[in-house]
Image (cartoon, grey):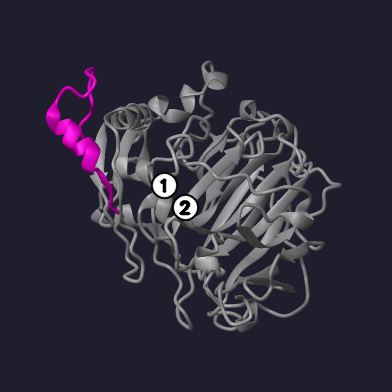
């Protein structure tokens, strides 16, 4: 990728590029046209290039993924997180002091749904057999087109505020949910779940569909909400395609100015050389056929205080430093699990963007998407199954959620839906 250099667009070729630069989005979904053209001033292009030079750190090795992603292997001490002013003296924690202790509960009841099976999920960039060397971390390289798909440079890699009040009213800015959540009276130090992976269809470029865990503390009706989030998402605006991707997010001020997705700003510190946050997950579940899921665990290191994340079979990915937060510097007060979509009401109708598999929870295993084995981390760093959850869906005719319990799956739920349909106009 070329840069604007030190001059202010004296090269006439750059002026041509700046004016005619287009947002070209390649997607696996033939039903969507993500291509938009708009003129880009040379000054804006220069600002974008400057921002990209800041977040795209010089790699020791570059890997081209079959899906078109470019993965840069960056020295772990050169990663974007350490640009944060609160982390200028931060020493990278190589590993957590403790993993949460599991509690094997002896229960009686139904077994897991018939045909349920755990199947391995990897990332697409692994397919060419090249991995990042020891001491580096893989970072998905951001491009000019990635930035131009966003509303503005400020909005690139950020969520819009989603809450206006308590968890009973979580809708805002067109965001809709189907979630399970804990109460707000207990101290929580982490959460875990195994999440079914699908590739829901997205109707409009700036809509998304995600399935994630939220670790929350602070007030829902103010500007001090702290949130740590991880899961998978399909976001054409952010990634330029319709593939489900592993993602993280954080904010310490109700999504106003702090935080971002993945490593698109300073904050999350990655320690793993094999997992690329923001890279596509493969394979994905298919209707009435093989089901694939991923396990995500987030917990607070009981001695150091950082919030660690593991993916799959206890593979450590990295952590959110305690310095980033106010309320979460201590503990969480609520956990949410579930799906979220954006409904832009294009043409005055509800979006047809799918949540989960695009099927309602009543369709069951192999057809509807699920979260299983919901657990929380308590005050003594022990995992325990969640038994008293509440569920919420703003519009059950569009997206719904149904929870249950079994011997193998513990507390689990099916969730999702197709969006627009005769009962969801």
Q: What residue sits 61% from the left and 81% below the top?
A: 364
Magenta residues, start to end: 1-24
Name the side, left or right, on which 402 lies relative to 151: right
Residue 14 magenta: yes
Find residue 275 and name its label. 1
Residue 55, image quadrant: top left
Q: Is residue 119 visible?
A: yes
Element at badge 2?
A: strand
Find residue 246 and name its label. 2
Q: Are marks 1 and 2 in contact (CB under 8 Å)?
A: yes
Crowding around mark 2 (Cα neighbors within 10 Å: few <14, some 14 to 19, many 20+) is many
Residue 56, image quadrant: top left
Q: What residue sits 61% from the left and 39% below the top?
A: 255
Name the side, left or right, on which 140 lies relative to 152: left
Name the side, left or right, on which 409 lies relative to 220: left
Q: How many marks?
A: 2
Element at badge 1?
A: loop
Q: What residue sits 54% from the left and 21% below the top?
A: 87
Nearer to us in this view, 157 or 44? 44
Q: Is residue 132 visible?
A: no
Q: Position of residue 423 (x, y in %)?
A: 63, 80
175 is higher (above) or lower (below) than 370: above
Nearer to us in this view, 27 or 346? 346
384 is higher (above) or lower (below) than 378: below
């Amino acid at each position: 990728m070329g840069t604007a250099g030190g001059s202010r667009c004296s090269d006439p070729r750059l002026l041509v590029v700046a004016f005619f630069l287009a947002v070209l989005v390649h997607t696996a979904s033939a039903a969507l046209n993500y291509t938009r053209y708009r003129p880009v001033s040379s000054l804006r292009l220069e600002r974008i290039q400057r921002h990209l030079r800041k977040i795209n750190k010089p790699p020791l090795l570059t890997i081209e993924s079959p899906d078109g992603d470019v993965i840069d292997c960056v020295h772990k001490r050169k990663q974007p997180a350490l640009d944060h002013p609160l982390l200028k003296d931060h020493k990278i924690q190589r590993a957590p002091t403790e993993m949460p202790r599991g509690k094997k509960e002896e229960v009686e009841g139904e077994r897991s749904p018939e045909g349920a099976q755990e199947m391995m999920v990897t990332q697409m960039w692994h397919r060419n057999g090249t991995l990042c060397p020891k001491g580096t971390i893989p970072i998905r390289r951001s491009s000019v087109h990635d930035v131009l798909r966003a509303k503005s440079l400020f909005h690139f890699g950020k969520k819009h505020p989603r809450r206006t009040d308590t968890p009973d009213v979580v809708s805002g800015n067109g965001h809709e949910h189907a979630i399970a959540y804990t109460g707000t009276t207990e101290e929580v130090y982490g959460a875990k779940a195994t999440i079914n992976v699908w590739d829901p269809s997205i109707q409009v470029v700036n809509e998304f569909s995600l399935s994630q865990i939220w670790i929350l503390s602070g007030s829902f009706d103010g500007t001090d909400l702290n949130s740590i989030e991880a899961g998978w998402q399909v976001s054409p605006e952010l990634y330029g395609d319709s593939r489900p991707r592993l993602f993280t997010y954080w904010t310490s001020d109700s999504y106003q100015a702090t935080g971002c997705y993945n490593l698109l700003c300073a904050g999350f510190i990655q320690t793993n050389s094999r997992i690329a946050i923001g890279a596509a997950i493969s394979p994905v579940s298919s209707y009435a056929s093989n089901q694939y899921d991923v396990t995500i665990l987030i917990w607070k290191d009981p001695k150091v205080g950082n919030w660690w994340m593991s993916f799959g079979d206890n593979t450590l990915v990295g952590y959110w430093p305690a310095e980033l937060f106010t309320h979460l510097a201590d503990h969480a007060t609520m956990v949410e699990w579930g799906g979220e979509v954006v409904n832009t009401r294009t043409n005055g109708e509800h979006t047809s963007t799918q949540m989960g598999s695009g099927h309602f929870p009543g369709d069951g295993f192999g057809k509807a998407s699920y979260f299983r084995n919901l657990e929380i981390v308590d005050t003594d760093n022990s995992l325990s199954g969640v038994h008293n959850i509440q569920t919420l869906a703003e519009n059950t005719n569009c997206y719904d959620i149904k929870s249950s319990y079994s011997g193998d799956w513990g507390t689990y739920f099916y969730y999702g839906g197709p969006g627009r349909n005769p009962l969801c106009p």
